[in-house]
């Protein structure tokens, strides 16, 4: 009965595998390696892996600890992390340096001081986002003031003052003005209108989501609005599990947990001396370092062509819709749903 139960778990895992990226990575190539690894997992680790894979990482699970070293027969010397991530998430994955441990993983470098094991939970990893080669700038016959939902100079007022419950309040919170102990505050916007109050983040990481089973954090689904256009409702429907924002040594990382891309800009994503806006597209399952504290230093104001001054210690994230020179939306205030991250000085 015991062996039959484990065999059943292994069959369930194998049914959840992704389609192969190429013939040489097909089921026959990875099946022996995967089953060799499954056999090395303890009963509770194998059961946890089944739950994680079948749920698609819908909840923050514990570590699945596997012995270090390659199981016998692992194709091309794949590590346990790469093997399971390729099997259940990214069939085109090749090397471990393409992966990043998520902030809540305790077994990345050996759990509880045990260097003989490491975490191979495929949903404790993200892939690293890299800037893509931009397409030619978007062309539109009537690109000018006639574009709908697009302000001419949005951020001069946008990031300095916003309406909140009947009072105008300052939301351009610089490192020197936040004194309540949080490392950042979040503001949620629909086009040029801020919805809800500022959300203070005190923990090292925070989920921002609309639908996240057993999740905690900044739930955008709970924010009411007097009116929402069809475009906003469609965009909100794509937020889903949203993103994980984490403060880590040296900077801030964003992990895209949704099923649609997110688009990010911050002063430290642009090369030094750049006069244009850099917007990074982060695909589902990928993560990116979206703010570098060391690079930011004591920068002065962040000046965006056509938009005016911005807080140099802020991050802007649009859900599902991109903006900038390569899109019809030139400004983030033309995006239906977006997030503003206002950073405090790191300790």
Image (spheres, rainbow, N blue to C red):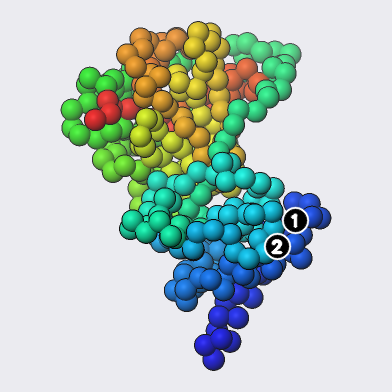
Tell me if I can see residue 251 in this picture: yes
Q: In this view, which residue lies farthest toward the left?
A: 179
Position of residue 165 relative to residue 177, above or below, is below
Q: Choose top left, top right, bottom left or bottom right for residue 345.
A: top left
Q: Position of residue 325 (x, y in %)?
A: 62, 17
Q: Position of residue 58 (x, y in %)?
A: 49, 58
What's the CA distance linking mark 2 and mark 1? 7 Å
Position of residue 309 relative to residue 21, above or below, is above
- Residue in the image at 67% along x and 64% along y: 73
Element carrying mark 1: helix
Q: Position of residue 185 (x, y in %)?
A: 31, 33
- Residue in the image at 51% along x and 55% along y: 123
- Residue in the image at 75% along x and 51% along y: 21
Name the image quarter holding the N terminus.
bottom right
According to the image, label 1 marks what residue? 25
According to the image, label 2 marks what residue? 30
Position of residue 34 relative to residue 218, above or below, is below
Q: Residues within 10 Å of mark 1 (few under 14, many from 20)?
A: some
Element carrying mark 2: helix
The answer to which of 68 and 216 lies nearer the viewer is 68
* Marks 2 and 1 in Cβ contact (< 8 Å): yes
């Amino acid at each position: 009965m015991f062996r039959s139960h484990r065999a059943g778990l292994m069959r369930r895992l194998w049914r959840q595998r992704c389609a192969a990226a190429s013939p040489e990575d097909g089921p026959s190539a990875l099946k022996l390696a995967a089953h060799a690894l499954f056999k090395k997992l303890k009963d509770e680790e194998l059961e946890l892996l089944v739950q994680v894979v079948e749920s698609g990482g819908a909840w923050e699970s514990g570590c699945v600890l596997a012995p270090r070293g390659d199981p016998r027969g692992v194709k091309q010397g794949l590590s346990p992390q790469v093997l399971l991530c390729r099997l259940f998430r990214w069939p085109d994955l090749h090397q471990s340096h393409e992966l990043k441990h998520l902030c809540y993983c305790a077994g990345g470098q050996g759990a509880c001081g045990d260097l003989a094991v490491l975490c191979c939970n495929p949903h404790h990893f993200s892939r690293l986002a890299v800037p893509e080669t931009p397409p030619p700038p978007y062309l539109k016959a009537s690109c000018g003031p006639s574009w709908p939902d697009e302000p001419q100079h949005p951020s001069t007022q946008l990031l300095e003052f916003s309406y909140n419950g009947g009072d105008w309040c300052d939301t351009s919170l610089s490192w020197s003005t936040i004194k309540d102990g949080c490392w950042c505050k979040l503001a949620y916007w629909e086009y040029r209108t801020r919805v809800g109050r500022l959300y203070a983040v005190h923990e090292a990481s925070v989920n921002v989501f609309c639908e996240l089973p057993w999740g905690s954090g900044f739930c955008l689904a709970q924010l009411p609005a007097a009116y929402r256009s069809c475009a906003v409702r469609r965009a909100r429907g794509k937020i889903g599990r949203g993103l994980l924002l984490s403060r880590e040594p040296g900077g801030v990382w964003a992990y895209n947990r949704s099923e649609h891309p997110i688009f990010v800009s911050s002063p430290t994503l642009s090369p030094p001396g750049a006069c244009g806006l850099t917007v990074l597209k982060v695909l589902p399952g990928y993560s990116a370092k979206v703010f570098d504290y060391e690079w930011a230093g004591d920068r002065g104001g962040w000046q965006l062509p056509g938009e005016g001054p911005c807080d140099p210690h802020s991050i802007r994230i649009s859900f599902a819709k991109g903006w900038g020179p390569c899109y019809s939306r030139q400004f983030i205030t033309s995006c239906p749903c977006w997030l503003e991250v206002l950073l405090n000085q790191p300790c």
